[in-house]
Image: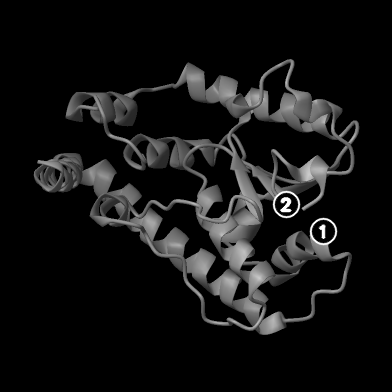
Amino acid sequence: MKTKHANVGLLNVLFMPGASGTFLANMLSRAITDPWWNDFSAEPPNEVFKATQEYMNPYNQIVMTWHPFDIKDDDALYDTKDINWINMTVTDKETKFTDIMSAIKRQDYNGITKKDILDRLYATSNPHYERTQLRQVEVAKKLAVNNNVMDVKWSDVFVEGNTDVILSMINFLFKGQYKTLDVVENIADKCKAKHVADTHMYNELLYNPDKVIDNVLEVVDKVYQDSKEDID
């Protein structure tokens, strides 16, 4: 791997929390490393992740995931050259969905209570999330000075499953040489299915939040207790 990629992936995805960027990174990584696997589907690593339809990215060296505040004002990433970035954007209207998704989709529930999640759910605004969205715009502009940044609409990937958009992301790395269209179609289908499942959870959170949150926290507690017993 080239030195310039020591701290980044071959492809990098900048996205808002709750926008399923880690799932997309999984799908793109497998499409890059195994372009013949035309029915691949990313899988949650344990019961906690499964309960919230959350994912981890074991392929960071291929497609690395970033949230806007992961990149600091003085980050050396701004001084790199010719690194490929996907800037996955959400509209102001769409942030209502992705913000609520980020309230329940967590990779670590340490110290998180039911009240924390309910407060996020019922809040009329989330200043931190709004600042994160503004931060994404700022970071993408600064990265684009020396690097290759492609703006991609979140809705094109997860709502529409636009195969042209998905192919363009892969060809951002392959310079137009990626031809495995059935893999691209699989990514589109899996991303749309992911969004349908997330939308179902979103609606359940709005109309029956206690049931959803209690179920998630019960799974979290069980996994924690099981892992504690394994250590003991």
Which coloring applies here?
one colour
The tally of labels here is: 2
Percent position (x, y) of residue 104? Answer: 32, 40
Indicate which label's residue lies in the foreground, 2 or 1. 2
Label 2 crowd (10 A; few <14 / some 14-19 / many >=20): many
Q: Secondary structure at mark 2?
A: strand
Percent position (x, y) of residue 26? Answer: 54, 60
Q: Is residue 31 left or right of residue 217?
A: right
Q: Nearer the viewer, residue 228 or 136?
A: 228
Tell me which corner region of the image, top left, top right, bottom left or bottom right, holds residue 38.
bottom right
Which residue carries the number 1 mark? 172
Q: Secondary structure at mark 1?
A: helix
The answer to whether marks 2 and 1 mark residues whose Cβ atoms lie closer than 8 Å is yes
- Identify which amino acid the numbered label 2 is placed on: Leu
Please name the residue shown 80% across and 74% down the image: 178
- Up/down of 116 relative to 96, above or below: above
Which residue carries the number 2 mark? 11
Percent position (x, y) of residue 16? Answer: 56, 37
Q: Is residue 6 left or right of residue 232?
A: right
Placement of the C terminus among the 4 image quadrants? top left
Tell me which corner region of the image, top left, top right, bottom left or bottom right, holds residue 29.
bottom right
Estimate the spatial distance between the alpha carbons at disc 2 and disc 1, rounded to whole Å: 8 Å
Please name the residue shown 64% across and 51% down the image: 61
